[in-house]
Structure formats: C-alpha cells, structure tokens
Image (cartoon, rainbow, N blue to C red):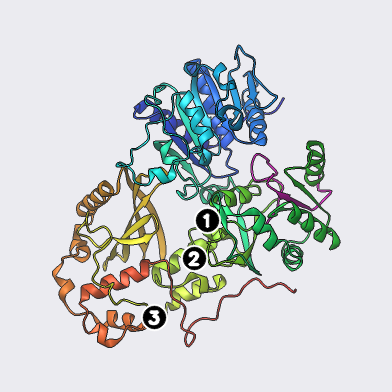
Amino acid sequence: MSEPIVLRPYQVEAIKKTALAVKKNETNKFIWVVATGAGKTVMFSELASRIIKRRQKKILILAHREELLRQAKNKILDANPDLDVGIEQAESSVDAENNHDVIIASVPTLGREGSLRIQKFDPKEFGLVIIDEAHHSSAKSYMNILRYFGLLKPQPTEDEDQGYRAQQVGPEPEENTDWNRSCILLGVTATPSRTDNKGINLIFDEIVFEYHLITGIKENFLAPIHAYRIKTAIDLSDVKKTAGDFNLSQLEEKTNVRDRNELVVKAYQELTPGKQALVFAGGVDHALELEKTFNAAGITASSIFGTTDGDTRTERLKAFLDKKIKIMVNFGVLTEGVDIPSIDVVLMARPTISGILYNQMLGRGCRLYPGKEYLTIIDFVDNTKRQKLITVASLLGKPNAIDFQGMDILSAQQDLDDLQEVAPGLDLEEVDVTKIKELIEKAKLNIEEVDLIGAVRKEPPLAAYSTYEWQKYNEDSYKLSLGTEKDTGIKYSFFIEESLIGKFLVKRHTYDSNEKKGMGTVDIGTYKNLATAVTEADKYIQANHSSVLGLISSDAKWRKDKPTDPQREWLRKFNVADAVIAKMTKGDATRALSRFFASKKRPNFNASNSSPKPKQTKLNI
C-alpha cells in the first residue's frame, strides 16, 4: 500500500479558502490558479473526498484528454483507496445505476451535441463538479455539460458586455440554466492570464486561491530554475495564428530545418551535457528529425507523439525514466497528465505564444527529485514581428528577450526589479544580467528619443474616475506612483490589475530607495468593475497617504509652474527639443516622463557612456 498523502500548507489553505467561500453563499462557481507541478490533482482529490463524506453527494471531474482522466483516477485512489471511481470515456462507461462516488468524464464524450450518455446522470445527486485545465471551459462542449447540470450562469446581454459576442463560442443559453446552486463548480488553471483564459469569466465568479510558480520555488515545493535564451536565424513573421497559438503545420515547416535542429543538439551538448532532457518539438516530423539528430551526435534519444501506440509509448517512457536514454523528444503528448520529476532540462524547441502551453511544458520539469539541484530551461527564440513569443522571462513579467545566461531566475528577477526602481526608463532587453548590481550603483542612463508632441496634455486614462495621475502600465493594469518620502526614502506605488474573471485588484507596492530593495506588495481589495476599484484605491490613498495628495492631483497648482532643472535634463535625454520644453509646464513634464517610464517601450543605453551590451549565450556552431 502506498504511503498516505500529507497535504502541503498551501494545499490545506486552498481547501480552507474554498470552504469559507462556499459558506458565504455568494456564488457556487470558483477558480483555483495553481502552478503546474504544485499538486492540483491531490488538492481537488482531497476536496472531493470531503464533499462526499460531508454532503453524501457524488463528484464529477471533467477533463479533455485520456492522460488527465487516468491521472485523476490514480491520484484520487492514492489519497482515498476506499472510494469507488469510474471513468466515462469512449468504450469505458460507468454502470447505468451510476453508483460510483466519483465519475471522471471525458468532455468530448459527455459534451458533444446530442449526447445521450450524459442523460444517465442526475445533476441533483452531485455536490461538486471540477473542470481540470479550466481555460477550455468556455468551449461549446463544456457549456453543454454545465447547462445540463444547471451550472451555466446567465450570460451577459450585448448591452451589458460588448465583448461577450466576440467571446461566446456556444449557443445562447436557455433561461434558468443556473438552477443547481447547491452544487459547487470548481475550475483549475495554471495561469492567471486573461489572454490564455479567454472567456473564463463567462463560467466562474470568484478566484478563491492562487499559487504561482515563483511562490512554489520560493517555498521549496518546486525546483529552482536556471535559464538560457538561444537565438535562432528562423523568421516566424509570416506564420499565421490559429486557436491562440501558431498554426502548427506552418510552424513545423519553418522550424524543422537541419541548422536549427543541430542548434538544439549543440545547446544541450554545451550547456547541459549528460543530463536527462525533455524536448518539445513543433510536430511529428520535427520530433523524428530531432531524435535522429541527437542520436547522430552520439546522444541516446527517443520520441513519442499522439499516434505512438500505447505499448510503445509506455516502453519508451520507462526507458527514459530508467535513464537508459538521455533525451525524450515529444510532440503533443507530455504537456499534460504525465509526471516525470527526474527531468533536469527542458528544451523549448517548439516556439509558442500561448502562456498556458508554455506553463505546461515548463511544468514537466518543475517537480522536485532526489539529487536534482535545479531545472534548466533552454528557450530557442526565433524572429517574429507579428507575435510575442513566450519565454521564461515572460513568466516573470519581463521582456521576453532577456537572456538569463544560466542564472537562477529568482535571483535575476529581484535584481531586475531593483534596477527598474532606480532606472524606470531602462530597456531591460539591453541589460547584461550579470552586471545588474553595477548598473544599480551607477544609475547613469541616457534615454533614446520619444515623441511627446500631442501627448503631453492628454488626460490620464482614468480621468473619468479619478483626479489623480493614474497611468497605463500594461494591457490590463494601471499605476499611480506616490513618489519617495524624503525622511524615510520609502516609495509607494499603487496598481490596479484586471483578473482573469474580469474583476479588478488593487495592490500597493513598497520600495526602499535607501536599500534599493523592494519590500513587498499588499492586496488592498478586489472590486467588480474599474470605476469602483479606482474609487476605493483613491479612498485608501486619501486615508493612508494624505501628505502626497498635492503631488498626485491632476489640478494641483504646482503643475502650472515651469519644469525643474532635473526635469529639463531628463527631457533632453529623451531628445526633446528645447523649444518644446520651453512650452511645457512642470505638470506637462511630470506627466510626459511618467507616461514614458510606465510604457512598455524601454529606452536603450546611449553607446557613448553605457555599460557593454549584454552577453548572449553563444554556442560554437
């Protein structure tokens, strides 16, 4: 018999927070955001067990792939061997009497239009419905199942949500589809990105728990990550986008070329020789060619993909687990539902613009394993002008072109955050990550030209809700900087961010200018719309930071004064003409500089008095 599973502290916290949210009875539709590798199946298995014992109700778990169905069944039985667990998928069908405690069902089987198999289930007998990989949940097949179980909430009208018609993929729901309020609906996803979880706000109401990759690494539940970025000569600019990612046939045609495949092998040989490596390919032919290229270089490799038969797949995976082969190349198989904690290296030979997919690929190697000090990620970055590739740096909220040069990403992230506080206009893509501490000390930056004409006196983006100088920070967030306190050197910044279910989070970040170190972020509140979030944030600032109100107010008298000498100097560094500066007020200068520093576009070093260009990971090819 296997050892009983002991829940980790954050897993216990997830269940407690869910129980409290259910007790509040404001909604029955919840989301967990849980990093790949953090044990989500163990978590919802424990929740399922408690629902069965306390409510005497059945559990339905929905997944879209066979591997996920089998994994869920095994994990539930490991944690609760006394439970009766059945699978509803293709030839596997639970008995007509439906006496199982837990039914793990294939979404294509139950959710296809006109399916009769779903009709043997009585929705009133179920106390919990779990959607694994919940980013799929707004698809028509999922909505069909939720409608049958009385869990599909009323959809917004066109007047209420102009974006709804673009997001909707299923038919218009019938009236009264949200009748089963005693049943809990729980979705689990690996990323909080609204882009990756498109339409998820149509299904769920509340995020009750979040546990991200970086937190898992900091708390020693996931492996530390060291990263490299290898630039290729391949251009993906004309590869089309399909279903949220690159068109696979076009992508494979571009990436499955000899020079690039040899580059992948060389990267492994020079950066991580002899280690157990998992390679993600862009297609079946690409996987086969990479396998051949590794073997030709004297490195034992095998490959698996969707059409590999079950026995062969099992045999090859066992050989990899037993370390009889060093390299496992795969396409479309090992992104979900397979745990291989002994992996030391993940080679991202398949470029992607999907944060969900990238998280899943990276997550295959994030689990801890005896003797494994850290996971190495090697990103192969192709040229593209139309799409933004996802890399390790993207997961940290940094420009994707940053090369960590094999550094620990958490250490590098802290240094990059500190550098941005000292030099907010700096282009991080131009930074040598091994020299960040030197740059923080020097903080002597020259900034490239930016066009301020016509933009200086535009109202702040939140002017309709606030009289303070909120600035656009990125696609889904806004920032208000309160400046630095002279006595303490403490700098406060407020952020408003839109969550994946369309609610708005207000956070306060604290930075110590004397120590040049971030002091953490505090959650102020979560609100149903942007107007309320801005109003509540302003109230908090008024109550707790009243001394700076004159600084951040859009109509403060000082804004009519002439720019200060430091402001003029900064504007000149932007190559703003003296004739333009002469027409500006102090308020114009402040707003212009704030907008530039908050923009995604970061200026380059001036070659005349900057640090050297960043080193890139070079290979002898």
Amino acid found under the numbered disc labelled 3: Glu
User: Does residue 115 appear in this view?
Assistant: yes
Q: Secondary structure at mark 1?
A: helix
Q: Nearer the viewer, residue 329 or 218?
A: 329
Spatial separation of the CA atoms under disc 1 and disc 2 = 16 Å
Spatial separation of the CA atoms under disc 1 and disc 3 = 29 Å
| Mark 2 and mark 3 residues within 8 Å of each other at the beta carbon | no
Spatial separation of the CA atoms under disc 2 and disc 3 = 26 Å
Residue 122 among those drawn in magenta: no
Q: Secondary structure at mark 2?
A: helix
Q: Secondary structure at mark 3?
A: loop
Q: Is residue 309 left or right of residue 185?
A: right
Please state, as top left, top right, bottom left or bottom right, where the C terminus lies in the image: bottom right
229 shown above or below 372: below
Which residue is labeled 2 in the image? Answer: 415
Q: Give the residue drawn at x 40%, y 72%.
A: 425
Disc number lying in front (2 or 3): 3
Disc number lying in front (1 or 3): 3
- Give the percent coordinates (x, y) of residue 99: 60, 13
Secondary structure predominantly adopted by residues drawn in magenta: loop
Which residue is labeled 1 in the image? Answer: 395
Instruction: Work out whether mark 2 precedes mark 3 in sequence or the reverse, and give the earlier one.
Output: 2
The magenta stretch is 322-350
Instruction: Work out whether mark 1 precedes mark 3 in sequence or the reverse, and give the earlier one.
Output: 1
| Mark 1 and mark 3 residues within 8 Å of each other at the beta carbon | no
Which residue is labeled 3 in the image? Answer: 449
Q: Nearer the viewer, residue 586 or 153?
A: 153
Q: Is residue 264 left or right of residue 587?
A: right
